[in-house]
Image (cartoon, coloured by chain):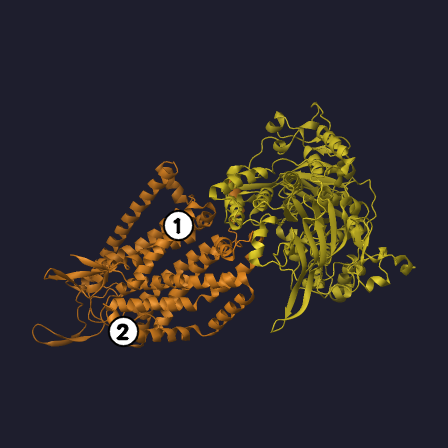
Chain colours: A yellow, B orange
Amino acid sequence: MSNARPLLSVRNLRTWLDAGDAVVRAVDGVSFEVHRGETFALVGESGCGKSMTALSIMRLLPDAGGIVGGSVELDGRDLLQLPESAMREVRGRRIGMIFQEPALSLNPVMTAGAQIAETLRRHTDLAGAALEERVQKLIEAVQIPDAARRRDEYPFQLSGGMKQRVMIAMALACDPELLIADEPTTAVDVTIQAQVLDLLRQLQRDRRMSMMLITHDLGVVAEMAHRVAVMYAGEIVETASREAFFARPAHPYSRRLFESLPTGAKRGAPLAAIPGTVPSLTRVFTGCRFADRCDSAWDLCHRVAPGWHGAGSGQMARCHLYAPGAKFKDDGGRMKAEVTTGDVGSHPSSFIPHPSVAATPLLAVRDLKVHFPVHKGLLRRVVAHVKAVDGVSLEIEAGRTLGLVGESGCGKTTVGKGILRLVEPTSGAVLFDGADLARLGRAELRPRRKDVQIIFQDPYASLNPRMRVMEALEEGMAALGIGAGREERQDRIDALLGDVGLARDLKFRYPHEFSGGQRQRVAIARALSVEPRLIICDEPTSALDVSVQAQILNLLKALQRKRGLAYLFITHNISVIEFLAHEVAVMYLGRIVERGSVEEVLAGPKHPYTRALLSAVPVMDPATKRNVIRLQGELPSPVSPPAGCHFHPRCPDAFARCREAYPDSARFTVSHSTACHLYAADAVKQKA
Amino acid sequence: MSFKLEILWTDALIYLLLVVVALLVRHVRRHEHLMAPWRKVARSASGMAAATVLAFFVVIGLADSVHYRPAVEVRDGKTIYAVEVLSVFDKLTTKLRTQKAKTYSAPLATHRYAKETIELPDGLQVRDYPRLTYGGAHLADPATEWGPDIARRCLYGIAGGALIWLVVATLLCVVLARWDPADTGRMWRALRRGETEIPWRAILLTLAVVLAVGGPLVALAANYHVFGTDKVGQDVFYQALKSVRTGLVIGTLTTLVMLPFALALGVMAGYFKGWVDDVIQYLYTTLSSIPGVLLIAAAVLMMQVWIETHPELFDTVLARADLRLLFLCVILGITSWTGLARLLRGEALKLREMEYIQAAHAFAVPHFRILTRHILPNVMHIVLIAIVMDFSGLVLAEAVLSYVGVGVDPSTISFGTMINSARLEMAREPIVWWSLTAAFTFMLLLVLSANLFADAVRDAFDPRIRVGRSFRLAAQKA
């Protein structure tokens, strides 16, 4: 395979973007090869130029971008020299592409079948019945159930996973030799991601197609790739086979990436976050691009850009560490990291910041329901309710973290907003410090607002672009009457910024001058400004890169230890829960299906949904063979949840009773319980 | 000669508007993020060229908005002031205003447009085109001297314009060179090649065109009726210039009236939702289903009756006409807020779900503070775009309304009244075409430059439009 001419060969590709007053060197001298039948993964954090590389290969750059140098050879022909008309023959026919957001990549006024047929009509002579048949075959090939009906449906009738499959069918329509998948599963849930990755792997094997996979998720890489290239700041810093890469990442950046991933084993200590941020690509680099953030950098790294050096077993790294003759500091950083993780791993629960003395929880939610009415008709009568949250109960003790896990649309965010009364709960009680927050009037609620605060997911939407940091931080204090006067509040703002690791003079800046991670720090400081006892963290790190996520998780953990904060941590990311939470609750379609301590739930999941969810998470270590439980279909609509157990239509273990009644809670230990018929006292008899 | 300053209602509001604009400019200059889109406007060649033309109109309009009453005589130590209210602009164009012909005369004519029986000194009567009292009166023999005189004056005008242009361009060059240290020669070259950040070349070119047209106009206007005269012999050029103020007043003051309605109701509807939204939506849906002209006509006619039954309230004819102009602005404003309100409602609906507003709710920040501190600043770009886009529409609306007869007072000179009187002129034989042409040309210039400027503003402020320069340019720069 490796001796033959590679299918795709990119040499010294350079793509620049015009950002108005500066030129962004988005892709700066990238070279790689994709062989036939191989999956090549391009990994990197956002803004490192991986998508721009893909768009340059397809010659689909935005208006402000241009390829300024290099060559892209597909089977020996330089695509960059082709006229546009010949390039159209290449796109779709020889190279297919899948984009990140399936909802935006399909035309909403064309049926799924028509969109697939469009590609075929452009590139083949198929027509009439032959065309129809081919479309049908393609839809079946991407495993869309009920293909005959689905082909005549419009994108709005299809779910997210289904749309992604249609996208894949379109990309595969003309049997391309190369498939470029740009973050194909970033916008879908873990269980759907597992389905889509499976499908891609199977299609690639059957068709002997080459695939270029672009992702930021090392787990996806571990599952899919044959060869891996790591991109950083516009250039590739390491290439390796999958086995070599996951066994021993060579470049310091790759190593730090692994170290900054949260896992259960790292619970006891802060994550090894990469300090600083990715450098701006508008500047000209003289030395190594990673030197400023690298802990094994020496003066040479700042002066001379490193060339490619072999690191053994076909692995190549752009790093002075591997230069022949350089003192071979083998894995200094890596060894250290392993020591610390190993040390903590032996007693994982050693980290309990505030041992819970009081048995009464800080926050107790009892049977919380949030239903949104669905209006219809001229008189806007209520015809149905979206049962976003349908009877959720949970407790959080002071100084502890409860992780609330679930797929998108399961109602976990609504729980957080319902507790804060950002949406009005339909029924149920939110007991905080003896008062029922759900029953209080606006005026009575006011003084209690300071106790519970929230941090949001999107660091770009959570700060008003027209307010300086100082004003954003002062707002809450002014509204809740904290701090005697302006001066005292300013002092507090200075202290807060110090607490979240930002310089004081940043308070005069506007949000647009900050990076995503810095904004999230400001958002945390804002929540802290009124000295809350509980913070609801609504996916605070899911919009951030791995290295920045590690910084924020460390910060949250440090703040918890320092101030005795309790967190309700809402996320879909299991590994973050593993790292941060003490207790965990798993939500499915508006209800909690399983809860318990992190060790109990993650190590011994009881509910079939929890098991499927955990098994769907891609595993980094290729050595561990996991048995993925494939869930059929997707999350049903919360307007009309299935009768009986909500999970039964997708459950591999469902039996007759699951269709009839919602199961009661079965208790295993003091803390661990699940709502499933499998564990009911008489279940065994029933099943038999 | 002493005078008494007379501040009309619209004058006062225009001064207020100027103060507001000045304060806004100060505010914007202090905030980098507010400044950034304006920088983009300043970089747009078409926008800045349009702004140059607009500046001339604004200067005329402002000069026409400073009114006074000159003293006519002093009796018993008391100064008696004239009944007629004049503006600074009137004073500057005294010749145009006072040198009236008797009736129609064609542009640049020396004789009247229609034959008349003339009594010769010897008592004989002939039917001929009589000489005009002022137009071309300095010519002894118009038949031979007219052509060369016009050409000479045109040349003088162009030469004068060129001189002014050179002075302005040199001054600009010197100032720019001092600003960012460079020698004047190099700055000159940069200007000529269009390499400056602000497109000074486009501005200077526009200025050159305006001066090349304006110079001869001014030079000729002293002794001719450049655009002819109307039925009562008034100079059409003067009328067209006077109309500029009316257009500007309508275009700006209407917005001032409309803005509070649109802002308050639109933002409230989007933010509070529920019954507030329902009420406001019903209100503007109802309002926008009534034919606008009908509503305006009813209001204007009622107001007209009121003005006529209260003559004691007005010292001068102009004060009365001015109040009617103001009322027209108010009525137009009250009927035209719906479009902007609808836009703002949509934006507020989107903004209220933003996380920073949710965070403010979590802090129990009162609704009013959320509205003023979070929502309003974030919809201002829409408001600004709407204001500049509406301006030209309102100028045109005035023309239509005055044409229909429900617009400004007949004594107020405006594009609409000019076009209205042209209706009869177009029907007579031989046709009198210059009134309409002048009104049309000036209105087109005003509206076109306003539209071009509005486009530049929209491009700069609309976050959905990214004004991307072609890539090659930047690559070369780098």
Q: Chain of mark 2?
A: B
User: Where in the figure is residue A380, as x and y percent of width and height?
Assistant: 61, 71
Depth check: give the residue in front, B460 or A274. Answer: A274
Q: Earlier in the sequence, mark 2 or mark 1?
A: 1
Q: Quadrant of residue A515?
A: top right
User: Which numbered dot is residue B25?
Assistant: 1
Q: Which residue is mark 2?
A: B310
Residue at the outermost left position: B122
Q: Chain of mark 1?
A: B
Disc 2 vs disc 1: Cβ atoms closer than 8 Å? no
Q: Quadrant of residue B447?
A: bottom left
Residue at image location 90% in from the left, 60% down from the top: A686
User: Where in the figure is residue A500, as x and y percent of width and height?
Assistant: 59, 39
CA distance for labels 2 and 1: 41 Å
Tell me the element at label 2: loop
Tell me if mark 1 has few (under 14), some (14-19) or many (20+) residues whose alpha carbon lies within 10 angstroms of its own: few
Q: Is residue B57 visible?
A: no
Where is B292 relative to A443, above or below?
below
Depth check: give the residue in front, B375 or A483. Answer: A483
Foreground label between 2 and 1: 2
Task: Give the quarter of the figure containing the C terminus of chain A.
Answer: bottom right
